[in-house]
Image (cartoon, grey):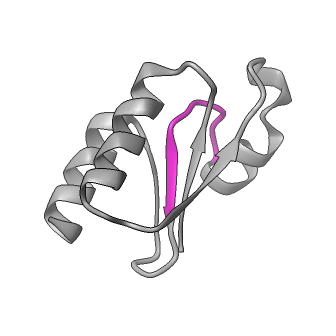
Amino acid sequence: MLELYRLEGCPYCETVADRLEELDIDYESVWVEALHSDRDEVKRVSGQRGVPVVVDERYGVTMAESERILEFLESTYA
């Protein structure tokens, strides 16, 4: 199962979520806090506090930055 760490109202997060749905990829949304200082879970899994972050256990991938995530989804799932 792929996990998407995201923030309500984040356009970059929405772009990734939309692409996951277009590719019919099952994923779980992990909603994070608005304040960077409260994003300990994101920091734990990715080493930084920004979103979006995708964790794909199937491929052993954890990555941030929407453009990189979209490239990964295209090359792996499309």
Say left or right for 20 vs 60. Answer: left
From which residue to which does the magenta span run? 47-55
Up-down relation of residue 50 to residue 55 (above or below): above
Residue beneath the point at 66% across and 33% down: 49
Up-down relation of residue 62 to residue 68 (above or below): below
Residue beneath the point at 40% across and 36% down: 65
Q: Main secondary structure of the magenta part?
A: loop
Residue beneath the point at 45% across and 81% down: 58
Q: Residue furthest bottom?
A: 58
Residue 8 percent location from the top left of the image: 63, 25
When asked about the image quadrant of residue 43, the answer is top right
78 falls in the magenta region = no
Up-down relation of residue 73 to residue 17 (above or below): below
Q: Which residue occupies the foreground of this view, 31 or 76?
A: 31
Residue 22 percent location from the top left of the image: 25, 52
Q: Quadrant of the C terminus?
A: bottom left
48 falls in the magenta region = yes
